Image (cartoon, grey):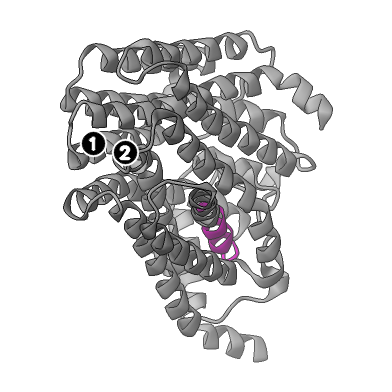
Amino acid sequence: MWRVLSNCWALFLGMGFIMLGNGLQATLTGVRATMEGFGTTITGLVMSGYFLGLMTGCNIVPKMVGRVGHVRTFGALASLASTSILVQAVFVAPWIWWAMRFVTGFAYAGLFIVVESWINEAANNGNRGKLMSFYMLISLGGMAGGQMLLNLSSPSGFELFVLVSLLVSLAVIPILLSTARAPQIDVMENVGVLQLYRVSPLGVFGMFVSGMSIGAFFGMGAVYATEIGLSVKDVSFFMSTLILGGFLFQYPLGWISDYYGPRIVIIFSCTGGAVVSFIALQYTGEGLLFYVIVATVGGLTMPLYSLCSVYTNDYLTPTQMVAAGGTLVLINAIGASIGSPVTALAMDIFGPQAFCGCIGVMLSSVMVFALWRLIKRGAIDAAEQGDFVVMATLPLSVSLNPDVDLAEIEAAGDEDAQDIRSSFEELINDLENPEDITSSEEK
């Protein structure tokens, strides 16, 4: 494991710079938009551009890499991301900022994919789980650290925008000087959203709401903190606490899900997260208790993506897991692009505390849906459940899932769309008509 990390240090260093810039840019954009008087709803729409760009990039960049290679793609997209934030500093207008947020999301999707594909190349069946954990540590640590950079200068100036550009530009150096062999990205066939919903309604619905909550957090969190009167320093601490809470709760919830199953943990975490979110309506950002509440909300909400991924994968074969990976990311991105403007509209109508109310309503909907699904379909046997794995919201992350053998991932690349659709139709038939399986086994 240490040999792998020593060979990949440049990739992780570059990823750290990327996430520092990403974390700072999201919060800086929200705070500055509030200062400029964009309006809460308009700010929510501006912030949604990032998630739409991310969704577009996840679909287009793998094909781009196939045509021009990893190094050229990474260099071009890093330059694009570095330029887009500078445009925001020069032209302060909502429609320009929306366009630049879209470009940023597209570029970051490509940067993530290129880095992840290199990491995947270094992984084997024995260390993929540990590599994923380290990757998530770098990602969430960088995001949290980026929030604190907000204190280096006033958001009303141009200096922080230049700093984001500088961080993204620095990320290019270790990546392009890395001696790791550039891998081949295979564009996998994906299953349809409707087919995947019929296999795992809770997994798909939970993934959509997880995206909505993430869109609300990173799109409107800084706006909410600013509107309730927090200083720039406290806004950065607010966002860092939210992210660190999500990181700290990942493994305890994963450990519990390995014993009781992901569906029970989804119900538990969404119920707890909704209750704490509604409690947060009474607080305005003063005192230690407020930040404990913020960390708890983030901790019970952010692991929802991984929990829903594990729950969905429990019903799938390894080949189907690979096909479902891109679809789950698409569902999550659609939810994120909706969550930000919906939360912004609610804040415009009901005031800044509607931010907490929206998170509570989102989590409550998953809890109610999960209880309904508990009645409609029984839990699968414990022996058939996979172990909890922390997953990033990119299609290539499925390759770091230790539940899927590398040979099976390579085999999945040879499956065509018709074969994938057929395999899911057979699975849906088995799930919707379990008596047919029982009678067949008796015969």
Instruction: Compare residues 169 and 28 and report the one nearer the observer.
Output: 28
Whether residue 126 appears in this view of the structure is yes
Q: Which residue does the image show at 46% across and 38% down from the upper left? A: 239
Residue type (three-letter) at the residue carrying disc 1: Thr
Residue type (three-letter) at the residue carrying disc 2: Val
Instruction: Compare residues 14 and 221 and report the one nearer the observer.
Output: 221
Q: Residues within 10 Å of mark 1 (few under 14, many from 20)?
A: many
Q: Residues within 10 Å of mark 2 (few under 14, many from 20)?
A: many
Would you name the residue on which mark 1 appears? 43
Instruction: Compare residues 428 and 159 and report the one nearer the observer.
Output: 159
User: What is the secondary structure assignment of the residue under circle 2?
Assistant: helix
In the rendering, which numbered label is found on residue 403? Answer: none
Q: Taking 249 as reference, is 24 above or below it?
A: above
Q: Are marks 1 and 2 in contact (CB under 8 Å)?
A: yes
In the rendering, which numbered label is found on residue 223? Answer: 2
Q: Which residues are magenta?
A: 305-316
Q: Quadrant where the N terminus lies?
A: top right
Residue 93: % across, % down? 17, 22
Q: Is residue 61 left or right of residue 289?
A: left
